[in-house]
Image (cartoon, grey):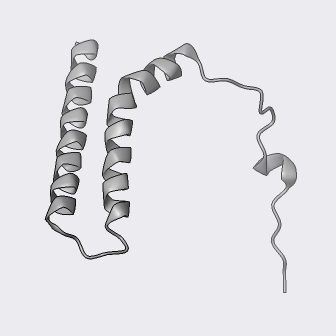
């Protein structure tokens, strides 16, 4: 049987001291409202894992989904405005 092993040099990045560029940081800042809304939705979904979903949980998840959609729409509109 043949063993398969990855070479350490190809798996690990050459330098871990690299930092994000200004453009990457700006992109993260623009996407932050969407990221936070998605985290809120995930938190709401995680809360319902270990018990049956009740009315309050349903509302919490529905509101979180609406916030995600609103953040996606705002990000899409902002990106479209910047390109034009």
The structure residue drawn at horizontal position 84% and vertical position 87%, both measured from the top left corner, is 1
Count of marks placed on residues? 0
- Residue 60 position, x and y percent, is 21, 53
Q: Quadrant of the C terminus?
A: top left
From the viewer's perspective, tell me whether residue 79 is left or right of residue 22.
left
The image shows residue 15, relative to residue 50, as above or below, that is above
Nearest to the observer: residue 78 or residue 49:
49
The structure residue drawn at horizontal position 37% and vertical position 23%, both measured from the top left corner, is 30
- Residue 75 position, x and y percent, is 26, 28
**Residue 51 picture quarter:** bottom left
Residue extending furthest bottom?
1
The structure residue drawn at horizontal position 38% and vertical position 38%, both measured from the top left corner, is 35
From the viewer's perspective, tell me whether residue 25 is left or right of residue 75.
right
- Residue 79 position, x and y percent, is 27, 22
**Residue 16 picture quarter:** top right
- Residue 17 position, x and y percent, is 77, 27
**Residue 66 picture quarter:** top left
The structure residue drawn at horizontal position 79% and vertical position 48%, both measured from the top left corner, is 10
From the viewer's perspective, tell me whether residue 9 is left or right of residue 59.
right
Nearest to the observer: residue 62 or residue 12:
62
Nearest to the observer: residue 27 or residue 61:
61
Nearest to the observer: residue 40 or residue 79:
40
The image shows residue 56, relative to residue 23, as above or below, that is below
From the viewer's perspective, tell me whether residue 16 is left or right of residue 53.
right
């Amino acid at each position: 049987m043949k063993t398969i092993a990855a070479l350490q040099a190809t798996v690990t990045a050459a330098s871990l001291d690299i930092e994000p560029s200004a453009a990457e940081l700006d992109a993260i800042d623009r996407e932050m409202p969407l990221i936070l809304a998605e985290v809120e939705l995930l938190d709401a979904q995680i809360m319902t894992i270990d018990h049956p979903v009740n009315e309050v949980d349903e509302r919490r998840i529905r509101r979180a989904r609406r916030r995600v959609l609103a953040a996606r729409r705002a990000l899409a509109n902002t990106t479209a405005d910047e390109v034009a």
